[in-house]
Structure formats: C-alpha cells, structure tokens
Image (cartoon, rainbow, N blue to C red):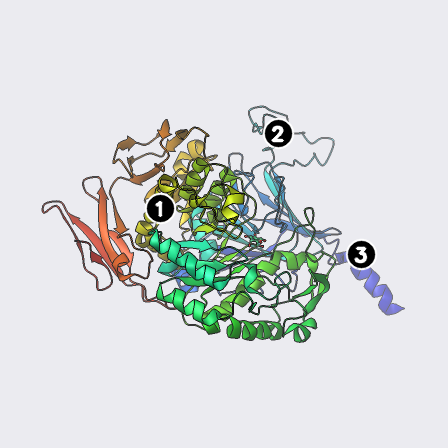
Amino acid sequence: MKKAFFFLFFIVLFGSVRGQDVHTMKCEQVYPGIWRYSIGKPDAVTPSTVRYKEPAADVLDRMGGPVASPVEPQAEVNDRGVLVSVPLSRDEAIYGLGLQELSFEQRGKKKIVRVNADPRVDTGDSHAPVPFYVTTGGYGVYVDNARYMTFYFGGKVRRPTSPSGVARKQDEEFLTPFNGAYSAGEGNEVFIEIPRSEGVDIYVFAGPTMKEAVARYNLFAGGGCLPPRWGLGFWYRVRNIFHQDKVEAFAKIMQDNRIPCDVFGLEPGWQQHSYSSTYTWRDTLYPDPKGLVKRLGEKNIKVNLWTQGYVHPDCPIYNDLLQYSGDFQVWDGIAPNFFIPEARRLFVEHHAKETVGIGTMGFKADECDNSDYTGNWSFPEISRFPGGIDGEQMHNLFGLSLQQTMMEVLNATGKRTLNLVRSSGALASPLPFVLYSDLYDHQGYINGIGYCGFSGLLWCPEVRSASSEEDLVRRMQSVICSPVAMINAWNLALPPWMQMDHELNLQEVIDPDNARLMALCRNAIELRMRFIPYLHAAFVKYYREGIPPFRALIMDYPDEKDAVKDIAGQYMMGDDIMVAPVVASGKGVTAKKIYFPKGTWYDFFTGERIEGGQTLELSFELERIPLYVKEGTILPLARVTLSADDPASREIEPVAFGDNPKPAVIYEDDGTLNPSLKENVITWDARKKKFSLKSSFYKLAK
Ligand code: GAL
C-alpha cells in the first residue's frame, strides 16, 4: 500500500515518461559540426542502431566546425508519441526527406515519411523516404527513427496561450504564395511527430551552407559509395523470359551494332520461382549459368541479378528462415528480419553459392518497398518481426536490410560493385545502390536526379519504353546524365531503337529504318562512356568528402537563392557540368528555359560562351542535350570503347573550356574494396598549347 502511494506520488510530481512535458532536449556534440539532441527512451531499433557503416570520424574531425549548434530542437514525450519542434526563420527554403518526385521546395508542406512503391500524391510517400531535411539556413536535421513520422514544414501556427496574447496577423507580405493560395509557408517552426515512440535522438548538422550540411550527414552515415569504373558505363536489362542462348545472342547484337555495354541485368526469369523467390536458377532457361557468366565476362559484360527479400517455400533455406521472419506472408513467401545475424548468414551463404560463386557481380533488389493502396501486396504494418520490430518500422528499414545483406554477399569477392534497389532510407550514403521505380513520368524522373542528392541517395531515371522516337532519345539523354545509365528492357525483346512498336518488338520484328534512331541512342551512350573518368572523380568526392555527385542548383549556388530555389529540372553533375535535360515536346526541337548561375558557361557541344546570372530560352534539336561547362574546366573525356574494362577507355582526350583552365584530377582505381585512388592531374600548358598527364593508369590519347 505504501509502495503504491509512493508510485502515485511520483507520477503526479514528475509525470510518467509518456505525458512528460519536457521541452529541453539533452544536447551533446558528437563530432565537430554535429550535435545529438535526445529525449526520453529512443526506440530499440532505429536506422543508426542497424547502420551499415560507422561515421567517417577522421574526415569529420579534419573538417572541424562551428562551436554552437545552428538550431536547437525542443521536444516533449506525450500520449501520441514524441513531438519535436525545430525553429525556422522566415525566409528558409526546405529540401530533403529522401526521394520526393512530386515536389521540390518543401516549405509549408505536411509530409509523412512512409515507404510506398507507388506514390500518386505529394504526401511524402516514397520508395526512399529519409527523415533528414536541410534548409537554406545552412544546416540539416536528421531524426533517428524508423516510424511513419509526420513533418509539418512551417505550415502550422500555434494560437496565443492567453487572452492577452497577440494572434499573428494574416499579413500578406509574410505569407508565401503556394499553389496560388496563401499561407502554407507561414509559421516559424518545423513540427515533427513521431508516433508510438517514447523518445528520440535528433542530429543537427552544421553548414555553413546546405552543401556542407549534406556532406556532414553523408560522412556521419560513413561517407558516399564509390562505384567501380564499370558501374559508370552502360547497363542493359534483358527480357525476363529470355533463354540464356538468347542473352548471349543479344550481347552479340549490341557489340555488332557498336553499342557499349558493361552490365547485363537478368530479370526475375532466372529464378525457379521469383515472386516470392527461391534464388535458384531455372534450368529450363539457364542450363549453364556459370558458362553464360563466363562468356559474357570475356566480352567485359558483368551480370546483375534481379532479386527480392521474400523467400519462397521451395527455397532451400525457407525452413531455417521461418523462425526469423515476420508473421505475415508476402506472395506465399516469408519476409525475414535480415538484421538478425543468423538470418543474414543463411541468406548470404545461399546467395554466395548461387550467385557471386559463379561470377555474377551485383543485384537489383526489387519489391523491398510497400504498396498499400495499389496492389497492397506487402506485409502489413501490424506485422511483428522477431528482433522487436513491427511492420511499420520494418517497411522503413526493409530496403536497407536487403542492401546490407546483399553487400555481405558481394563484399566477399573483394571487389566493389554498383547495384540497384527499389527502396532505401536513412544513412544509406555508403551503400552502392541506385534507386529506380516503375513510375514513369519523365520530368519527375529528371527531378529525382538532383533531388536525391539532398539525402544521401542516388537515382536512375531508367528507360523502359517510349511513346515516340523523340521520347526515347530524350529519355536516353537524361539517363546518361544520371548515376546509372540504364535501359530496363525486361519487357522488350529487341533494343527499343530497333523497333518502337511494343507488340512488334516482342515479336522481334526489326524496323528496317532504325539507323537514325539507333545512331542517336548510340551517341548518347557513347557520351556516357566519355564521361566515365569525370564521373568517377565526382564519386571519389562523394566517397571521401560526402559531396553528392548529382546536386540540385540550390546546393551549389546558395547566394542565388531567389533564382534557383525552385529549379528542379537542372542539376550539377560533378563540380563543373550543369545538366538541363529536355522532355520530348512532340515537335522534335524543344525550347527550354534555362537559368545560368553567375559566372561564365560554355555549351558542351558548340563551345558557345554564355554569361551567367540570367535565364535564357533556348531551342534544342533532338541530338542536343543541354550540357553546360563552367569556365576554367578541363573535362577529362575518355576514348569511347565498348566497355569501361577495355584498357583503351583509359585514354583521355581532354577538352578545355576557357583560356586558363584549372587542372583536372582523375583517380587510379583497381576496383578493390580499399582502392588507393592515386590522384592523376591533367594540366594545360597555354604557352605550348598542350595537355600533360602523368599516370601509370591513364594516358593522353594520341
Ligand atoms: C518490377 C520492377 C521492374 C521489373 C519487373 C519484372 O517490380 O520494378 O523493373 O523488374 O518487376 O517483373
């Protein structure tokens, strides 16, 4: 009785953890420029407790940083979970939350970070939602939690707390016009609601600009990934139901037509049972997968295999995995919790034998997202997984768990790879996976390229089919200016340029007039091959310094905020090239308004000089991609080869833009897990009018 009374007294006096009204979070500087704010008891499983890599502490230490945190979040644990408030000033623009194809600047929006394969409305649903945002105030905020959190980005205003308080005026000057209506941008707080949690850790990343804040976030995640050189070449995914002889014949078609190709992707058809998966070869289609992989390898073509995380009863490890799996089925299979070491070990061992054991080099981890409203095929939020994770948390972590597991399979080869995945999330920067989707709006696909750079993600605007020749060429041009240059022809029998009509394509009827279209597509692919050393160097910066290789303009031009804060369709590819891909207009030639940030730019193709600080409306013939190079750049273009593994691809044909270009740096790379990445510098001698390059890896083309 006495005990019970004391307990009651305690609750009345201090509040329980829930219902506690604690506003000041405990703050601790964890690395220079990074602060952790904590309240209550964080969930046992969060993205950081299951992280892939430890923070790149040495780089963060070297970066140094300001002494004070740029913002101070406050929080309370209440009967709904945790409510966080982060101050926001009047003119801050907000970006991030992972892949968001349906909007760009986020101020005034309400967003829920929830994995969904098929977002139709701008609610925050995404293949890869990430609870991390950055603002033009020059800082970033990461919420370390796997629940479906709601972010209110400045859209809500609290009422006065007493009758004598002053209500905020609906003052037009203060309000941001949004979609033609008023008020969404008002409010000087970001509210974040974390349901069903009793505490949380929040990390604040200092700038001074968004670019540094994002770099710190990526370094905190362990640094960016570094693809092998071949990963930056050209990828082609062949038809799902091809027999292996057909796959080989296809490689010949590509090479006979001088179409470069580094990677062939095999789609679900390689497996005995794919939805859910056995991860065993279907011998009627692939009687000798090892021989196939070997012979493609002789042509420098690597094999990437489609896979998913749902294990079919016929899979040899099904029974062993049952005890580690969620309590709901997906496509007759089970969804294991791959964060449990034993579950991971079983999966890795099985895959090692069937896949990398015979020489395959990567995976496409499909279907690891969720689709509640279209198809509703995945495990429900009410699921329970061994290891103390429920279905809601698992949805935000499943893609990450699958990527980590596949990396354990792949890292055993001692070589680096690049892979594909359909769902990702927080702290994913070091995972060498690129996102793709079944959604197919070309402009949305373009916007994703730069936008993913706000959150440590990479995005591929894959080409599948096209409504016209013009659409095909424009999509090819976008995809070659993205992290993975890929055609996903899982449902095509011929390359799309050989037959545009889908039915005829499936019947393998070659269009006799395909020469021009093939040439246009080949030109785009060849350009990609030329960019490999440049792109590789951009990725080295991601790997070492956390700077994303593809970035929205606002990240590089914060001083021109008013001009660039809403530009979604232009982005930086590396430090020196601005890309502004064109969407087919139906007329062949397309007019596009392009903003040129301050400075001098050169048209990549014509060398025409353009002064920055202005918007120009320009017209682009079908063969032209709007690519602009900063004055003072040497582009280390590679000789075009059929694959990046061809030694001739290391012959460099530099091109200078402007009279006194700064040296270009490219890196030697042996493709191993810890490459030395020796710097090779290309300089221009203005007097002798000559480039020079000292390297035992690259050489200047004659
Ligand atoms: C989809 C995937 C496509 C393709 C297809 C094959 O889920 O997004 O890229 O792989 O499955 O069935």
Residue 56 location in percent, x, y? 44, 63
Which residue was labeled with disc 1? 522
- Return the residue found at the far left: 688
Which residue was labeled with disc 3? 12
Instruction: Tell me whether circle 1 and circle 3 mark residues in contact (CB < 8 Å).
Output: no
Residue at the image point whose x is 43% and y is 61% from the top: 248
For residue 321, what is the image quadrant? Answer: bottom right
For residue 344, what is the image quadrant? Answer: bottom right
Name which of mark 2 and mark 1 comes first in the sequence. 2
Residue 166's label in the rendered image is none
Q: Note whether residue 347 is visible.
A: yes
- Up the image or down, 223 lies above or below 87; here it is below
Residue at the image point whose x is 46% and y is 67% from the top: 360
Secondary-structure class at tag 2: loop
Residue 195 location in percent, x, y? 70, 52
Residue at the image point whose x is 19% and y is 54% from the top: 701
Which residue was labeled with disc 2? 183
Packing grade of label 1 (10 A; few <14, some 14-19, many >=20) is some
Choose between 436 and 29: the one closer to the eye.
Answer: 436
Name which of mark 2 and mark 3 comes first in the sequence. 3
